[in-house]
Amino acid sequence: MAERCNAEFISIPITQADLAESLPDAIWHAEQPFFNSHGVAKYLLSRAVREQGYRVVLTGEGSDEILAGYPSFRRDMLLYDQTGQDPATVQALLASLEQGNAVSRGVLMPDGEALPLDSVRRLLGFAPSWLETFAANGFKAHAVLSAGFLAAQQRRDPFLDVLERLDVHGQLRGRPPVHQSLYLWSKIMLPNYILTVLGDRMEMANSVEGRVPFLDHKVVELARSLPVSAKIRGMTEKYVLREAARPVLTGTVYRRQKHPFLAPPAAAAPDGTLHELMQATLRGSALERVPFYDRRKVSALLDSLPGRSPAAQAALDPVLMQILGACVMASRFGLC
């Protein structure tokens, strides 16, 4: 692509040691835990951009939100927009989607048992796949939460709490499930995580201004008017954008599936420096600063990692990274 665009390509190698060293600073700037060390990677990327002398950059945040880029949206289309589709074909496509997006397991695609989403299904008529993913991670997190915290929160429905803050009936009634999922993601995850952990805060930490052309209000308004078939065609996501950009794309980029901006999961890299930091922090006194977790349960989960498959280790990474982030925040901000 660089050759095709006559651009200079600069590779920025990032090691586990780099991620471990910069994790506390990245979390300090983000003011929230990460579910993957991708936030640290974006922090280091922004630093490299500044070292090259650039102050302003264009970034791609928002394109997945307005054009259904994530695999969870394709899963929603297969599950909840089956009019005229052969059930066997749908099941084959679902299996292919799962197999082709293993890197998204536990991050953008559901993995394993999940917290109940009955209230979401009653309110929306279905459960968006990305909320299923969060419910699965929540189930894993429940296994290491302290008894006191679980008791205090047992009557709360966190999913319903969030949805009731939005104009669900006014904005979602009568819209296709994929568009409902896009709307909810764009209201919840885009401003509160994507544009902070993977956007503005990591950029401004290095005095770099990131501009987001896909979130120009005219572009968003146009995308909002497009049918689902213009965003997902068959199993091809962001279809209309691919076609619009096809003349300037290489064939490899044009054909490839969405690959989320993720760092290798620390939980699945036992010889890595970031994994060592995770083990040392979660087994040490730092966890005492965070009253939400049970130290013995966390240690037992860490002990179980070597006996799990690489895929199962990777699926636990979001939970362990969030605990690690909470420990870092407690220390850096003096919360406890």
Image (tube, rainbow, N blue to C red):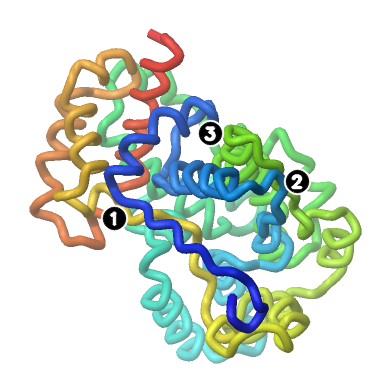
Please tell me which of labels 2 and 3 falls first in the chain: 3
Q: How crowded is mark 2: few (under 14 residues within 10 Å), some or many (20 or more)?
A: some
Disc 1 vs disc 2: Cβ atoms closer than 8 Å?
Answer: no
Query: Is the residue 300 above or below the residue 199 in the image?
Result: above
Q: Residue at x 42, y 25 (%)?
A: 154
Query: Is the residue 312 above or below the residue 241 in the image?
Result: above
- Could you tell me residue 53's position as x and y percent? 63, 47
Disc 1 vs disc 3: Cβ atoms closer than 8 Å?
Answer: no
Q: Residue at x 65, y 62 (%)?
A: 64
Question: What's the residue type where badge 3 is placed?
Answer: Pro
**Alpha carbon distance from label 1 to label 2:** 33 Å
Q: Residue 168 carries which label?
A: 2
Question: What's the residue type where badge 2 is placed?
Answer: Val
Please tell me which of labels 1 and 2 falls first in the chain: 2
Q: Residue 314 carries which label?
A: 1
Residue 159 seen from this side: yes
Which residue in the protein does label 3 denote?
158
Q: Residues within 10 Å of mark 1 (few under 14, many from 20)?
A: many
Question: What's the residue type where badge 1 is placed?
Answer: Ala
- Could you tell me residue 311's position as x and y percent? 25, 62
Side (left or right) of 215 relative to 59: right
Figure quadrant of the C terminus: top left
**Alpha carbon distance from label 2 to label 3:** 16 Å
Asked which quadrant contains residue 46, the reply is top right
Q: Nearer the viewer, residue 37 or 176?
A: 37
